């Protein structure tokens, strides 16, 4: 698994952490990953009166997803039928990356990961993208143990 430990002292719920992770990934992708995670956290903390720790679970999760995005995209592409990843909307692509990362690199229950991803999609992704995300993540969840065994050592 990933060496990111759950921070039980965090003021954020898991749902809030996923939402913040999504927003950070969106900011990073929008600027072609030219900004650091620390820069994005600082902007969120100042602009939205948050107190996200620079070395906390959220920051570590974002770093891990960013570092592994090519690997995550390879996994996603395997489950896309008649689609190219580049044709997906940005929000859909980011939510899929987050969901696949959690399925492959954590022990969180698949149903929770998928449901939280669907909720993010309903709030931020293209219309009806949540159905597409649900279908892809369901397929990934079916292969979860195989993917965990096959995953690269990052």
Image (tube, grey):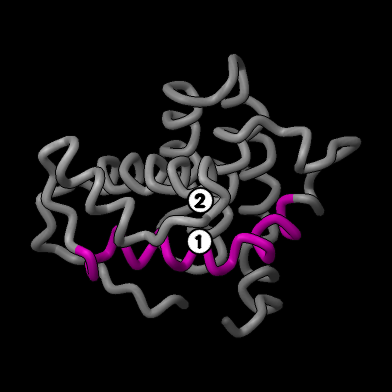
Please say if the residues under marks 2 and 1 sit with CB atoms less than 8 Å apart.
yes
Q: Is residue 87 above or below residue 154?
A: above
- In this view, the residue in front, 50 or 153, is 50
Which of the labelled discs sits on residue 101, or is there none?
none
Q: Magenta region: which residues? A: 54-76
Q: Is residue 88 above or below residue 143?
A: above
Marks 2 and 1, the one that precedes in the sequence: 1
| Neighbourhood count class around disc 1 (C-alpha, 10 Å): few under 14, some 14–19, many 20 upward | many
Q: Is residue 59 magenta?
A: yes
Which of the labelled discs sits on residue 98, or is there none?
2
Q: Residue at x 57, y 50 (%)?
A: 32
- Whole-percent x and y of residue 17? 28, 48
Q: Residue at x 10, y 39 (%)?
A: 49
Which of the labelled discs sits on residue 65, or is there none?
1
Labels in figure, total: 2
- In this view, the residue in front, 46 or 109, is 46
Q: Residue at x 56, y 65 (%)?
A: 104
């Amino acid at each position: 698994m990933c060496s990111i430990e759950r921070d039980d002292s965090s003021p954020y719920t898991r749902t809030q952490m996923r939402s913040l992770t999504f927003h950070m990934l969106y900011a990073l992708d929008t600027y072609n990953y030219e900004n650091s995670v620390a820069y994005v956290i600082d902007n969120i903390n100042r602009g939205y009166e948050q107190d996200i720790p620079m070395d906390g679970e959220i920051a570590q999760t974002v770093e891990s997803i960013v570092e592994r995005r090519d690997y995550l995209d390879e996994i996603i592409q395997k489950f896309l039928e008649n689609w190219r990843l580049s044709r997906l909307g940005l929000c859909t692509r980011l939510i899929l990356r987050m969901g696949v990362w959690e399925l492959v690199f954590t022990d969180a229950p698949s149903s929770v990961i998928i449901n939280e991803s669907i909720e993010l999609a309903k709030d931020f992704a293209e219309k009806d993208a949540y159905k597409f995300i649900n279908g892809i993540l369901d397929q990934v969840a079916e292969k979860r143990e195989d993917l965990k065994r096959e995953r690269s050592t990052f």
